[in-house]
Image: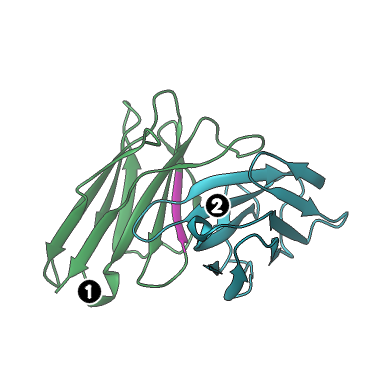
Amino acid sequence: LAKTTQPISMDSYEGQEVNITCSHNNIATNDYITWYQQFPSQGPRFIIQGYKTKVTNEVASLFIPADRKSSTLSLPRVSLSDTAVYYCLVGVGTYKYIFGTGTRLKVLA
Amino acid sequence: DSGVTQTPKHLITATGQRVTLRCSPRSGDLSVYWYQQSLDQGLQFLIHYYNGEERAKGNILERFSAQQFPDLHSELNLSSLELGDSALYFCASSELAGLNTGELFFGEGSRLTVL
């Protein structure tokens, strides 16, 4: 199956903005890009979803360039509780939804 | 609480054995997805069912099988278990077959340990 790649890990300080990228060269034409947050031993939890350009909700923004081969999750003013693993999820065709390799974010005091 | 229920939460068994993991989707959701997450690894897509029919397969081994029943619950059967099958198995559900303008709702997972 197609590989969807993310940086392995990132460190940030509280109050800073964090940007996490996902490369998804094989995204299907009509499929959306979704981002999830996962804490240890828990199921992933939805953060944000978009198709193109920019989407913003109460917790994050998602930036998607015109070619849709990548996306960037932006977390404004992170706190210690944002320490988690972040995954992008993309459709690669025919109802297959593949998670990215995951980015482990550590927020420091 | 996502509304997706997985049982059992924990399961310990021996190599060569067979186990069944069960998933009840959110009320009204027709799609069920299974993912495998090995220790410190990412989420690997196994299989997707929609309204009782298989819609997509990922990296699912031949020793593994799944089905979705008329009441929409799903079971993942793992047989001839090996040490490497030890993992967290997640079930997720969604309303439709495709995820456009929708999201996956995940259960808390079933942790399988093969000794």
Report the span colored magenta.
B43-48
Q: Which residue is painted at 48% across and 56% down in the image?
A: A81
Question: What quarter of the picture does the N terminus of chain A occupy?
Answer: bottom right
Viewer-proximal residue among B3 and A68: B3
Residue B82: mark in rendering:
1
- Whole-percent x, y for residue B53 in the image: 44, 37
Viewer-proximal residue among B45 and A46: A46
The amino acid type found where label 1 is placed reads Glu
Colour green, chain: B
Among all residues in the image, which is located at the extreme front? A109
In the figure, residue A88 lies in which quadrant? bottom right
Q: Is residue B77 above or below residue B72?
A: below
Task: Name the residue carrying label 2.
Answer: A36
Q: Is residue A1 left or right of residue A29?
A: left
- Whole-percent x, y for residue B32 in the image: 42, 40
Chain ID, mark 1: B
Q: Which residue is painted at 74% across and 42% down in the image?
A: A56
